[in-house]
Amino acid sequence: MSPVPGKAVVRAPGRVNLMGDHTDYADGFALPMAIDLETRVAFRPTDDGRVRMRSATFHGLLDVAADGTAEPPTVDPPWGRLVAGVVCTLAARGRPPVGIDATVSSTVPAGSGLSSSAALAVSSALALLGAAAWTLPPTDIAVACQEAELLGTGVPSGIMDQLTSIRGVAGHALLLDCRARSVEPVPLPSAYAVVVVHSGLPRALADSAYAERHAAVTAAAARLGLPALRDARPEQVADDPIARHVVSENARVLAAVAALRAGDVGALRPLFAASHASLRDDFRVSTPELDRLVELLVEHGAVGARLTGAGFGGCVVAFVQRNHADDVTTKATRAYQRELGLEPHAFVVRAADGAGPA
Ligand code: GLA
């Protein structure tokens, strides 16, 4: 979106997760990066106490009270429910009820597991804060956006997406400790590319299955008498596939960080393979199509590939030697298309800075 004169413009990136899925809501570790696909909100403050937002992609005008008295789940158009949620969670933190006239546009594909909703929530939050000349610490903005997701859409997401969208660092993945909500940038080797491949399979039943998994993870911790599965030892979860995934995935995140810091890219290969297998067999959030796409990417030369995000369709992520990235992805996606008759879409992403003024 080109800036409109007289308006301010803010941006918030999507994210791809390299390692550590379904660990954030167990107080665990994850290794995502903010990407060079983003949502932008162009806005100007108004004095009528209304938050009005149009979307360049979706129909309808969002028009809610800036004081957070709207009921987000009943808001029409539906894409505005998350934004209405952000209005509420910021109002609850004391944001003055200044209105905005805003337009949102995005290059983050919706419903593909690249956190288009976190990018929308975070960019809306920055516009609302900017209009009211009011600030909050970045972690509080992330938590307000996470709460808005539950309030507006009913999805009990973890903190990974929002924290990554705010705290991204160009050229780096982020080691997230989701209990401490702390972020440590981990440099990515420039000779390797991060490739995202959309499977051509829309994410199906993702929200209900996500909430079920979340509940199962919470229940497993309660059975063990622990605050969260972050605190479980491998031998305590050996017979519980759901808990076993979380515990083993946390360990893989720390191992992947150690490998990147040591410049030992080869050590990532078994970690990617084990992560995908665990999401497929223990946590059961993969599909045959994602499994095949991952296999083909590795067969054709990726260092590693795995499903990324919540699963149930959407995207896989691959780590590939940069000068072979085109070759590997072209061969793998052609074979996938031939075998499965689905239209995959591959693109290289770069690790981007977190949200801010555009
Ligand atoms: C979605 C959620 C995140 C995280 C991932 C799975 O993206 O929004 O909080 O739980 O799924 O790792």
Image (cartoon, rainbow, N blue to C red):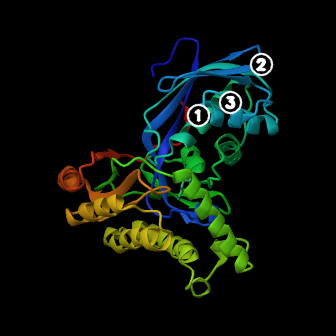
| Coordinates of residue 156 in the picture (x, y in percent) | 65, 53
Q: Is mark 3 within 8 Å of ligand 1?
A: no
Residue 18 left/right relative to 331? right
Q: What residue is pinned by disc 2?
A: 49
Q: What residue is pinned by disc 3?
A: 75
User: Can you say whether 236 is above or below 322 in the image?
Assistant: below
Q: Where residue 123 is drawn, which disc sits there?
A: 1
What secondary structure is found at the residue carrying circle 1?
Answer: helix
Q: Residue furthest top?
A: 5
| Coordinates of residue 292 in the picture (x, y in percent) | 29, 62
- In terms of image quadrants, where is residue 47? top right
Look at the image and tell me whether residue 177 can be seen. Answer: no
- Which amino acid type is shown beneath numbered disc 3? Val
Q: Where residue 271 is drawn, which disc sits there?
A: none
Cα gap from disc 3 to disc 2, whole angstroms? 17 Å
Residue 322 left/right relative to 208? left
What secondary structure is found at the residue carrying circle 3?
Answer: loop
Circle 1 Cα neighbour tier, 10 Å, few/some/many (<14 / 14–19 / ≥20): many
Foreground disc of the pair 3, 2: 3
- Which amino acid type is shown beneath numbered disc 1? Ser
- Which amino acid type is shown beneath numbered disc 2? Gly
Cα gap from disc 3 to disc 1, whole angstroms? 19 Å
Cα gap from disc 1 to disc 2, whole angstroms? 19 Å
Q: Which one is earlier in the sequence, the residue at label 3 or at label 2? A: 2
